[in-house]
Amino acid sequence: MATPGNLLIENSDGYTRNNGGLRTAYPVYIDSDLTVTGSTNIAGVSLTNLTVTGNTVIGNAATDTTVITGTFATGESTSADRVVVKGIYMNAANVAVAVPSITDPDSGSVAVDVSAAFTVQPAVGDAVIAIPQAALPTNCVMTGAYVTATDTITVAFASTAGNVTGANVNFKFLVVDLT
């Protein structure tokens, strides 16, 4: 009999022990915590109908990189408003954005070519977060950012309580590839 906390593998129909490993054509149920340590390679493993409940940690946020190739989805698999994400990208180098001069109480925008900043091509329908790397000019607020054409992100600005004197500001862009 197995001791609680240990895995008992018996040579019986459908289950075979192979050099300390387990091969089975039957479902494997784990009703408690499962901790895997050491070098674990699951490349080429297909996990279908995998349900994970509770807190799930893949990797160590401080030291590991977790890469999901292809797409990933969040939410209920039967939900009509489920989102499938192809990737989340941020440009490595700053991109200069020419904040326009704006007469209060007006607004303005600038289209930014980001083709040299990304190895992927942001497209209409992708989500964008514009992140200024320095303070915006006095009286200026950023009101949004969106993809207006492939490799072109438009950043919108408005004035608050006075005119805005245009200036170049370095930005980074976080792009969520939804297309």
Image (cartoon, helix red, strand yellow):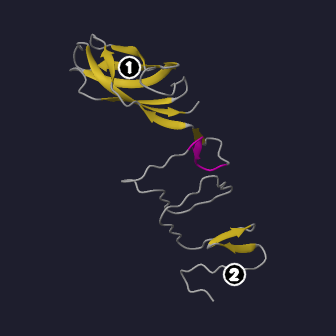
Whether residues under marks 2 and 1 lie with C-beta atoms below 8 angstroms apart, the answer is no
| Quarter of the picture holding the C terminus | top right
Q: Residues within 10 Å of mark 1 (few under 14, many from 20)?
A: some
Q: Is residue 27 above or below residue 6?
A: above
Left/right of residue 44 with respect to residue 129 in the rendered view: right
The answer, for residue 68, to whether it is visible in the render is: yes
Task: Give the image location of residue 139, x and y in percent.
Answer: 23, 20
Closer-to-camera residue (40/169): 40
Residue at the image position 42 percent from the left and 53 percent from the top:
64
From this viewpoint, which residue is outermost toward the front? 19
The answer to if 78 sits in the magenta stretch is no
Camera sees residue 28: no
Q: Secondary structure at mark 1?
A: strand
Q: Split into 4 quadrants, where in the image is the N terminus?
A: bottom right
Marks 2, 1: nearer the viewer: 2
Q: Amino acid at mark 2?
A: Glu
Q: Which residues fall within the magenta stretch?
A: 69-77
Q: Main secondary structure of the magenta part?
A: loop
Q: Nearer the viewer, residue 88 or 53?
A: 88
Residue 10 is tagged as 2
Q: Image point 55% across, 26% down: which residue?
A: 125
Q: Position of residue 40 (x, y in %)?
A: 53, 61
Question: Position of 102 compared to 58: left or right?
Answer: left
Q: Residue 2 is drawn in which quadrant?
A: bottom right
Dot 2: what SS? loop
Q: Please, what is the three-letter code of the amino acid marked with disc 1?
A: Ala
Q: In this rendering, would 128 be left or right of 141? A: right
Reading the image, the residue beneath label 1 is 156
Q: Is residue 71 magenta?
A: yes
Could you say which disc has been placed on residue 40 in the image? none
Q: Quadrant of residue 169?
A: top left
Q: CA distance from mark 2 to mark 1?
A: 65 Å
